[in-house]
Each structure stands twice: as structure tokens, then as C-alpha cells.
Image (cartoon, rainbow, N blue to C red):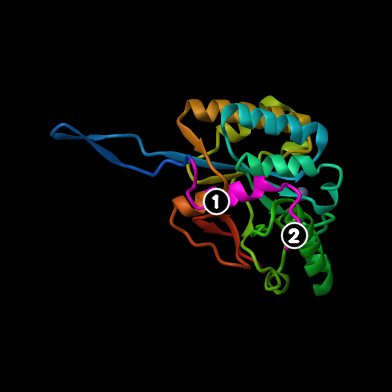
């Protein structure tokens, strides 16, 4: 048996994984006495973070999310895990989904098939060593992959529906506003836990959307809530929308 770095942490998570944790089930109406009363439909959003782990930014983000009891999805770069193993363990322990953002953050469509598989598998090995065997969904760097290379991917792939371009704007208030003004239930939001401004923005987004009644879920949970069984090699923008691969 492979040694699992995060130890019992991984076991606890595996046991809890199927129950979808605190996720509320959608309910359109509820009965009060004799009358049926319309209640607001639950709203769900999946925040996703690319390009970590990075000690000075991912750590404070995990703190902020834990304080708020919120889960998210982290698409991590394999080569950045060394020295940041504790952050990966914390992601798993806190119920976040961990995804694969390749080992060295390359545009997969520029690589030959062997290199594509290597970029994905090297990251899987690093992550499995820490949190145990599980499916690490792929977010191709830059959202780029072509159909011949997508056929080599044996997990679902995740794009996004809301992109505030946090890496370019580098202003937490503007990034938060760009997300909050656009977001709708079922959206997948792209952020990067590489920039302090994005971490600040993310926590502001959580506070503002929570006040609007949103529940934060992982991408995997969002698929389950929507009753969509994700397929391998498909690039999903959200459970409802796929992104065409040429
Ligand atoms: Zn990236």
C-alpha cells in the first residue's frame, strides 16, 4: 500500500466524500400548514483557484475560507507542491476539491502526446502521495487543449463561466465587483490563489454572495447538485455548458 502523507486526514475525507457534506438539496416549495409557500431557489456557485499552491497567498486564503465555512476547488501546479505539502493536506482536510493544473503549467496543445500524459500523471503522483488515490479533474493551463490531446485525458476537464481577469486587474475591489455583478447560480468562477489581491477579492466575493444567499460548493458538488455525471475528456465550463474543443 502506498504511503499517504496526510495520513488519517485522507481516510476521513474519503469516508465523508460521498455525502456531499453540508450541501443543501434544492427545494422549490415548502409546506406551511395547509398552504404551499414559494421559497427562493437555492443558489450555488463554485469558486476555483488556479496556479497555486503558493505559501504566502494560498495559506491566508485557506484561513479565510475555513473561517467562513466555505469550500472551493484548487487546480494546483504539480511542481509547486514541493515545500507546500501542508497546504495540500489542509485543502483535503477542509473539504476542498483538488484538481490538476499540469506539472509545469504548459499549454498542452503545444506538447506531443507523451509529454501531455507526463504533465498530467506527474502531478497525479505528487497529489496521490499526499491525499491518496482519487480523481483529480484537470484544468488545462490557459483553458487550452485540442481534441487529439483531450482524448488522452482520463478525467473530466473544467473551464469556467466567469473570468474577472484577476491576474491582469490586480485590484481586489474591482475583481470582486467583476464577479459579483456577473455571477448567477451554477457558475464556475476563475480566480488565482497566486496573487494577494485575488485572495482579498475571493473573501470579499464570499461575503457579498453569502449575503445574497449563495452557497459555495466544489465543482464536483456542483455537478452532483445539477444531476450531471461528468465524462472524461470533456471540457466543461459548468455542469450545464461544455466548451467546444477543436
Ligand atoms: Zn494557470
- The image quadrant of residue 126 is bottom right
The residue identified by callout 1 is 15
Q: Nearer the viewer, residue 198 or 135?
A: 135
The residue identified by callout 2 is 124
Does residue 101 appear in the picture of this structure?
Answer: no
Q: Nearer the viewer, residue 109 or 82?
A: 82
Contact (Cβ within 8 Å) of mark 2 with mark 1: no
Residue 39 part of the magenta segment: no
| Residue with the most extreme left position | 34
Q: Is residue 10 above or below residue 246?
A: above
Q: Is residue 53 left or right of residue 93?
A: right
Residue 203 placement (x, y as % from top left): 64, 28
Q: Which residues are magenta?
A: 1-21
Disc with the residue nearer the chain's start (2 vs 1): 1
Residue 153 placement (x, y as % from top left): 69, 68
Residue 47: image tag = none
Q: Residue at x 71, y 74 (%)?
A: 148
Q: Is residue 97 above or below residue 30?
A: below
Q: Residues within 10 Å of mark 1 (few under 14, many from 20)?
A: few
Residue 97 placement (x, y as % from top left): 63, 48
Amino acid at each position: 500500500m502506498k504511503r499517504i502523507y496526510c495520513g488519517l486526514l485522507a481516510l476521513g475525507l474519503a469516508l465523508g466524500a460521498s455525502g456531499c457534506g453540508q450541501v443543501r438539496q434544492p427545494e422549490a416549495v415548502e409546506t406551511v400548514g395547509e398552504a404551499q409557500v414559494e421559497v427562493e431557489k437555492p443558489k450555488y456557485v463554485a469558486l476555483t483557484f488556479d496556479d497555486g499552491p503558493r505559501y504566502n497567498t494560498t495559506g491566508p486564503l485557506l484561513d479565510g475560507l475555513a473561517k467562513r465555512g466555505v469550500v472551493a476547488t484548487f487546480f494546483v501546479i504539480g511542481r509547486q507542491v514541493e515545500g507546500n505539502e501542508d497546504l495540500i493536506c489542509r485543502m483535503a482536510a477542509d473539504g476542498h476539491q483538488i484538481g490538476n493544473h499540469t506539472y509545469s503549467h504548459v499549454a498542452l496543445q503545444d506538447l506531443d502526446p507523451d509529454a501531455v500524459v507526463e504533465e498530467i500523471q506527474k502531478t497525479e503522483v505528487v497529489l496521490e502521495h499526499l491525499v491518496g488515490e482519487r480523481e483529480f479533474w484537470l484544468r488545462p493551463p490557459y483553458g487550452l487543449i485540442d481534441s487529439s490531446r483531450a482524448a488522452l485525458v482520463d478525467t473530466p476537464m473544467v473551464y469556467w463561466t466567469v473570468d474577472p481577469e484577476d491576474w491582469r486587474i490586480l485590484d481586489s475591489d474591482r475583481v470582486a465587483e467583476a464577479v459579483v455583478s456577473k455571477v448567477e447560480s451554477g457558475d464556475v468562477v476563475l480566480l488565482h490563489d497566486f496573487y494577494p489581491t485575488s485572495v482579498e477579492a475571493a473573501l470579499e466575493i464570499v461575503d457579498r454572495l453569502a449575503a445574497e444567499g449563495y452557497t459555495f460548493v466544489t465543482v464536483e458538488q456542483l455537478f452532483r447538485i445539477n444531476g450531471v455525471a461528468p465524462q472524461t475528456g470533456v471540457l466543461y465550463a459548468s455542469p450545464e455548458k461544455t466548451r467546444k474543443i477543436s
